[in-house]
Image: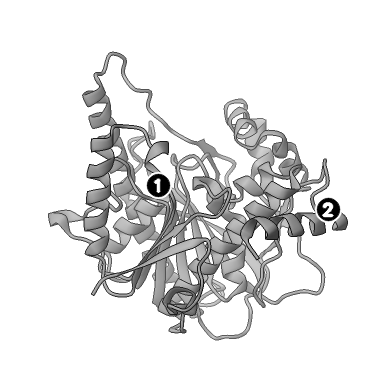
């Protein structure tokens, strides 16, 4: 059965069940794994780095990190806040305006709790297995970890702890326990810049952001390593994190944070890059002395045809050449997976299209299919590298991949 036919049939089933009728509140898919979802937020400060945007010269880099972890599954579907701190954000004129613009008519539903996650804050950690592999997740520019709730919950339901970092100033808004909310930061570009000067400025800004984001990822792993060896009364996950099995994962700008963190830090055993190519520069960041990634990489990208890219044909060809050269240097066990089902776009890795398609059943089914496709490849790759399982979805040449093209990288 082809994809279009599947979508039509699934749409009819959703309509008959009342899942996506007009006016319905958007719902996240139920996680497919055997575990329930627990969640805990932590406010951590890296005293080795200054806060480059704070007016206080003594301020250091501060982050909110949310640990999503396996818990016992309950018979009744769990309901948790989709975005902790949303009401506080809404009360601040500048922040609230931005959030209303970002989430549109779903923002009141988030505030009321009508849109919810499956996470239970403070739920007891699942008793078995004794240790869980760890994934550090970085969101895209102007988003937050909560914008990827469906993806994160599904991973957790299959036995992973996910540390979702809200990268301060890169996130749309970060709510801290003391009541502060720090919004997305962007310096306005000076007027009168030539195209070359504008590109140079953009590159410098992106470089600083990627460097800081990678430092955030490495700091969080260091913090978790310290706490994993602490007393269980101080940290409920003490001794439960398998720090020999750690991956970094990110989407868009966050994919570059994750990739650079892996280039700089051998503690990471695998890297998942979700549509993080930096046009017109290349597919991956480059470390000091042109160092490249040494861990197995899943480069999971959307098909971006040249006709949809800005710039000249010569610039496109130069980008493709650089991308090909960079991916060719990835180690054995790496993959470039290009996804091309109907409706697949850069935002399909997040909850964005699930929310936007709430009144369009056929498009909603396509969005669910695309998210499920994404989750399947991520889970297969992480299971292979962190749980040492087989990955027929990636490795079986006889498996059909109607919505994906898989290139095996490395020698």
- The scheme the figure's colours follow is one colour
Q: Nearer the viewer, mark 1 or mark 2?
A: 2
Q: Residue at x 52, y 39 (%)?
A: 172
The spot of residue 65 in percent (x, y) is 50, 56
Q: Secondary structure at mark 2?
A: helix
409 with respect to 89 (left or right) = left
Residue 15, which numbered label?
2
10 with respect to 408 (left or right) = right
**Residue identified by numbered label 1:** 253
Q: Mark yes or no: residue 364 visible.
A: yes
Q: Nearer the viewer, residue 214 or 65?
A: 214
Residue 222, which numbered label?
none
The answer to which of marks 1 and 2 sits earlier in the sequence is 2
Q: Residues within 10 Å of mark 2 (few under 14, many from 20)?
A: some
Considering every residue shown, the one lying at the far left of the view is 289
Q: Residue at x 52, y 43 (%)?
A: 143
The spot of residue 398 in percent (x, y) is 47, 79
The image quadrant where one finds the N terminus is: bottom right
Q: Residue at x 48, y 35 (%)?
A: 184
103 with respect to 204 (left or right) = right
194 with respect to 127 (left or right) = left
Q: Residue at x 46, y 84 (%)?
A: 390
Image position of 49 with respect to 218: above or below = above
Image position of 340 with respect to 55: above or below = below
Q: Mark yes or no: residue 28 visible.
A: no
Give me the C-alpha separation between circle 1 and circle 2.
36 Å
Count all numbered tags in the image, as a single digit: 2
Labelled pair 1, 2 in contact (Cβ < 8 Å): no
The spot of residue 347 in percent (x, y) is 53, 46
Image position of 105 with respect to 345: above or below = above
């Amino acid at each position: 059965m082809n994809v279009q036919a599947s979508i039509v049939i699934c749409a009819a089933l959703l309509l008959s069940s009342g899942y996506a009728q007009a006016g319905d509140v958007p719902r996240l898919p139920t996680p497919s794994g055997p575990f329930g979802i627990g969640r805990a937020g932590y406010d951590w400060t890296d005293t080795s780095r200054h806060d480059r945007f704070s007016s206080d010269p003594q301020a250091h880099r501060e982050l909110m990190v949310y640990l999503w972890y396996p818990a016992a599954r309950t018979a009744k579907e769990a309901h948790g806040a989709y975005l902790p701190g949303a009401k506080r954000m809404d009360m601040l004129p500048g922040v609230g305006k931005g959030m209303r613009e970002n989430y549109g008519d779903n923002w009141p539903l988030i505030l009321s709790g009508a849109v919810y996650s499956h996470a239970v804050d403070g739920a007891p950690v699942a008793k078995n297995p004794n240790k869980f592999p760890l994934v550090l997740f970085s969101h895209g520019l102007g988003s937050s970890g909560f914008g990827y709730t469906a993806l994160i919950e599904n991973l957790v339901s299959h036995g992973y702890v996910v540390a979702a970092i809200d990268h301060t100033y890169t996130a749309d808004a970060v709510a801290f326990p003391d009541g502060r909310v720090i919004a997305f930061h962007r310096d306005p570009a000076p007027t009168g810049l030539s195209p070359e000067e504008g590109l140079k400025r953009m590159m410098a800004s992106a470089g600083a952001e990627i460097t800081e984001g990678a430092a955030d990822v490495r700091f969080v792993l260091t913090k978790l390593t310290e706490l994993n060896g602490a007393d269980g009364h101080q940290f409920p996950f003490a001794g439960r994190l398998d720090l020999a099995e750690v991956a970094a994962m990110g989407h868009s700008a966050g994919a570059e944070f994750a990739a650079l963190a892996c280039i700089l830090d051998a503690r990471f055993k695998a890297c998942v890059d979700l549509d993080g190519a930096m046009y017109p520069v290349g597919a991956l960041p480059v470390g000091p002395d042109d160092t490249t990634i040494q861990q197995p990489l899943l480069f999971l990208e959307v098909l971006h045809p040249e006709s949809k890219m800005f710039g000249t044909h010569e610039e496109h060809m130069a980008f493709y050449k650089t991308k090909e050269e960079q991916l060719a240097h990835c180690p054995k066990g790496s993959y470039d997976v290009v996804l091309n089902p109907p409706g697949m776009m850069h935002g399909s890795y997040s909850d964005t299209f699930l929310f936007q398609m709430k009144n369009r059943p056929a498009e909603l089914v396509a969005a669910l299919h695309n998210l499920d496709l994404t989750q399947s490849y991520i889970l297969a790759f992480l299971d292979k590298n962190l749980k040492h399982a087989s990955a027929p979805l990636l490795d079986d040449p006889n498996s059909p991949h109607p919505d994906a093209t898989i290139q095996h990288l490395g020698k």
